[in-house]
Image (cartoon, coloured by chain):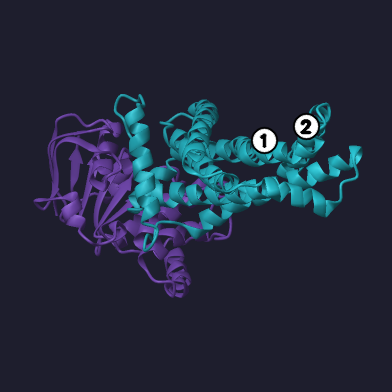
Amino acid sequence: MRNPHGKKSLWDFFSFLGATLSDAIQIRGNRHISPMVLMRQILFTGYEALPLISFIALGIGGLVILQGYTLLSNFGQGNLVHMILVTVVINELSAMITALVVIARSGTAISTELGNMVVHREIDLLRSFGMSPISYLIVSRVYGVMAAMLILTAYFNIIAVLGGWLFSQLFSAIEFRAFFNDFFNQMRLSSIVVTIVKPLVFGLVIAVVSSYEGMSVKRSSTEVPQRTIKAVVNSIVLIVIADFIITWLTWVLVPR
Amino acid sequence: MNVTFDKVTTDGGLQDFDLLLDIDRTLVINSTDEKRAKAILNAIIGLDEVIAGSLTIDGKTVEEYIGDQPVVSVFGYVFDEGIMLSNLTLRENLLLPYRMIRDKTADDNFDEEIVAWFKFFKLEADLDSRPDFVNPALLKILGFIRPLLFSPELLLIDNPYYLLSQEQRKAVLNALNQLRKDHKMLILSTDDDFTKGFADRTLTL
């Protein structure tokens, strides 16, 4: 991570990504990977974000149904509102909004915490033991954020669909079972694949980018907020790019 | 133990640096250029990267010298400040490297060893406290104890008197005088009192 000239290049990022992935793959027998760091990350990123995710998911699910029904009923196609719920919420919004929440809560926290650890020479301390900071601090966080993203996105989907059904009661009393039958009829293999792949990729991106920015702090505590801002901006940009790529690949490769 | 710097350049500030350190028992580096002296310790333990030149110990590269042994069994680094991981308690901090090289049953021995070292340094501390709530001088002394749990071949000590009160300095000097019988030490000191009171061999940079 040290660069005598202090400037970071794209090569530094890919080298960091390579080291992280290499350590992440060798999880068996790697005594530097900490289950405690992993569990704390899942607790903070996943469990503690549940109330906020519930609130957003309920709102999004309801609003999509409300807007979709208003639009489609003009053409006598109000029953297609489930298709909008699957296409908009399950395929796109759930992973994206969950990722934005995770960036805001955990990406910033990871970047700030690691940046402060560099400033207080805690990374040097680990290295003086012969411990790999990548294995101990980064890999555990990567697995934690990926697991939390997967759980949160699934949870978002459930709450959003429930929210959609609740809001649908405002304009037509659709039976709970009928609503979900229609909903599952609209679900395709591609939606299931996307619901699994996107959160995992987004989780990897958030954890790696935030960790990289945090570890890129040199000596001064004033760098920490600057690096945190970079972590947020770069994570969002990379997630949108990743979203495009995954959606395109799913569209091309997975039968609908 | 011979540590040889041959035209070494590091990212920590050494430039084409030549030095032969013959560490028989204890060697104190007394320097007004603290940054350069720190860079020597950091290069040996690998905190600074050697960009050019060669750094060898008894004719082997540092990696070859360490071989398959845990780093903590070869080098023990005592930082000038008592650095600890702030999100762990003092106990978890001390246990972190300990668990890495010993099996889980070693946790039972840990308490016995810690009590012995606390007596040795005349120290009292609540090990369940977080580092942020503990006096920096106490953390500094725990920083001596942490590497000593592994009986390293070479203790690298950065400014042993830094942060310590007069009373604590006496305790540390006394402890180091006892430890010198069993441990090789390379000490960086900018404190003349320590150098005069402890060193039998001094290298002035």
Image coordinates of residue A5 in percent, x first then y, are: 30, 24
Foreground of the two, B53 or A251: A251
On the image, which quarter does residue A194 sit in?
Answer: top right
Instruction: Look at the image and give the colour of chain A.
Output: cyan
State how far apart marks 2 and 1 are (Cα).
Answer: 10 Å
Dot 1: chain letter? A
> Regarding mark 2 in the picture, which secondary structure is present there?
helix
Q: Which residue is mark 1?
A: A88
Chain in purple colour: B
Please say if A157 is above or below A100.
below
For the question of whether residue A90 can be seen, the reply is: yes
Image coordinates of residue A187 in percent, x first then y, are: 65, 47
Q: Which mark sits nearer the N-terminus, 2 or 1?
A: 2
Q: Amino acid at mark 2?
A: Gly
Who's the residue at 18% across and 29% down the image? B15
Please say if A182 is above or below A75.
below
Q: Amino acid at mark 1?
A: Val
Dot 2: chain letter? A
Please say if B96 is above or below B7.
below
Who's the residue at 51% across and 25% down the image? A226
Residue A68, numbered circle: 2
Q: Are marks 2 and 1 in contact (CB under 8 Å)?
A: yes
For label 1, the crowd category at 10 Å Cα-Cα, with few meaning under 14, some 14 to 19 and many 20 or more, is some
Quadrant holding the N terminus of chain A: top left
Q: Is residue B138 left or right of residue B24?
A: right
Who's the residue at 35% across and 61% down the image? B148
Foreground of the two, A151 or B143: A151
